[in-house]
Image (spheres, grey):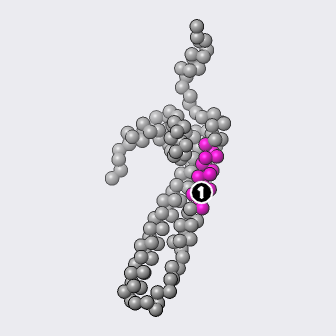
Amino acid sequence: MTDPKKQKIEATEKTRYSDEELEEFKQIIMAKLEKAKEDLKMLMEAYTLDGEHGTDDTSPTFKILEEGYQVMSKEENSRLASRQQKFINNLENALLRIENKTYGICRATGKLISKDRLKSVPHATLSIEAKLKQVPRV
């Protein structure tokens, strides 16, 4: 015979992660946040560097190519920095959800996002099922 209380508990779907689980996720996010901030700092330094490499005494053609490369490189670093800042904001928002004890709950279905997904993408707000149902952006 099975215990009716145990059956009732198993039938009840978990609605949020435990405080211990939330703390585990918090540690993962804090580590990713620290790394992301270091990466952003490096990108910002690369973006704001003067970029003077002493091409004044070289041929004019080389100087034009060098300057064009520097502009493209700065634009790319700017895009990467912007993307990195968005990632940092998403991680910080995930920390707020942990504090509010709403972390890991899919904003589309209201069900828990799988632990595997949250460990891979700790700032996720959608379950895999909800993400796959989204209309692709063009």
The N terminus lies in quadrant: top right
Residue 98 visible in the shown view: no
Residue 58 lies, in percent from the top left, at 43, 90
Task: Answer above or below: position of 101 versus 32.
Answer: above
Task: Answer above or below: position of 128 versus 44.
Answer: above
Residue at x 39%, y 85% (from the top left corner): 62
The part of the chain drawn in magenta is 25-38
Residue 76 lies, in percent from the top left, at 44, 68
Q: Residues within 10 Å of mark 1 (few under 14, many from 20)?
A: few
- In the picture as drawn, the residue positioned furthest to the top comes out as 1
Residue 60 lies, in percent from the top left, at 39, 89
- In the picture as drawn, the residue positioned furthest to the bottom comes out as 57
Magenta span: chief secondary structure: helix
Q: Is residue 37 magenta?
A: yes
Residue 102 visible in the shown view: yes
* SS type, badge 1: helix
Would you name the residue on which mark 1 appears?
35
Residue at x 42%, y 81% (from the top left corner): 66
